[in-house]
Image (cartoon, rainbow, N blue to C red):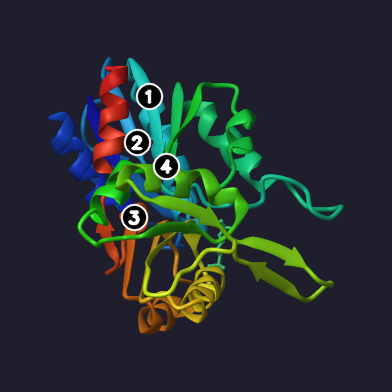
Amino acid sequence: MIIVPTTPSTKLAASIGKRLGAKVSPKTVRRFPDGEMYIRIEEDLKGQDVCVVGNTRTDENILEMMLTMDAAREASPRRLIAVVPYFGYSRQHRIYKPGEPVSSRVLTRAISDNADKIYAVDVHDEETLSFSPKPFENIMILKSVGKHFSGHGIDYVVSPDDGGADRASAIGEILGVQSFHLEKVRLDDRTVRMEVPDINLKGKKILLVDDIISTGGTIMRSAAIMKEKGASKVYMSAVHGIFTNHSDEKINEIADEIAVTDTIESEFSTISVADEVSERLRRDE
Ligand code: R5P
């Protein structure tokens, strides 16, 4: 297999390549004088199994991913796999108000145009998978998160909402502890109350787990509630650390630790998804 990285996934692509014993193709990415993007894959991909690793986090990342997929397809590989570590726009997987697009469908269709198979890492909502005419699988990152926190003496794994309850329960199982989720109760248009099950959290060590930390609002509110209930330590983890507007700085002030994965690289990417992704790719070889 030959791995073709895109700029935001360079390090992760190298880690996946190392685990698979696969060559990572050099690639040129630059701008034409008018600002348009130019890319070139240096390796000959003809007849090879090829895996392009690329995020759809920013519009620039999306463009590079699309151009790379097109270049890879043009090179006549035997099979072309797309691995999307962070599937941006997946929170718009449905129309909430008339006049909106289904953004995750737009991206899924564009990627599936050239891909024989797509993998996303912990996509926000699995409805996105249904938009692809080609096989599209979601790789959940549970083992690596569990492993990272195995020596922390965690008492409970907590999800900030019911959508993440399965993730919290699976990580809880790995750590051999119980899990629960907070319940969002909408009081009116502007006010949401977060309810905690009746559990004594005094002196307990809590691991909050979510799929995404963006503004940090969700995880910080959840952490505040845990502290109010007497938790002695609150560790915070998510698969994708977007950290909009430097929210990592505010979160870091109240968290006993923040640990996110390398689907989006940051100083808090202390967990790698490379094991889970390469294990899944190996089964396809
Ligand atoms: C919500 O459904 C997601 O699972 C995350 O909780 C949310 O996207 C986090 O966003 P923020 O950090 O802006 O609160």
Is residue 22 visible to the viewer in this orientation of the structure?
no
Q: Which residue is mark 1?
A: 80
- Type of the residue with mark 1: Leu
Q: Earlier in the sequence, mark 1 or mark 3?
A: 3
Residue 207 rendering spot, x and y as whole percentages: 39, 62
Q: Is residue 28 left or right of residue 233?
A: left
Q: Quadrant of residue 221?
A: bottom right
Q: Spatial distance from mark 4 to mark 2, Cα to Cα?
A: 29 Å
Q: CA distance from mark 1 to mark 2?
A: 8 Å
The mark nearer the N terminus, 3 or 2, is 3
> What numbered label is drawn on residue 148?
none
Upstream in sequence: badge 1 or badge 4 = 1
Q: Residue at x 43, y 51 (%)?
A: 178
Q: Quadrant of ligand 1?
A: bottom right
Name which residue type carries label 2: Val
Gap in angstroms between the C-alphas marked 3 and 2: 12 Å
> Mark 1: which secondary structure?
strand
Q: Which residue is mark 3?
A: 8
The residue to which callout 2 is attached is 52
Q: Is residue 210 left or right of residue 42?
A: right
Q: Is mark 4 within 8 Å of ligand 1?
A: no
Secondary structure, mark 4, is helix
Whether 121 is drawn above or below 116: the answer is: below
Using a 10 Å C-alpha cutoff, classify the residue at mark 3 as few (fewer than 14 neighbours), some (14 to 19) or many (20 or more).
many
Label 3: element kind: helix
Q: Which mark is residue 170?
A: 4
Q: Quadrant of the N terminus?
A: top left
For marks 1 and 3, give the CA distance.
Answer: 20 Å
| Secondary-structure class at tag 2 | strand
Q: Amino acid at mark 3?
A: Pro
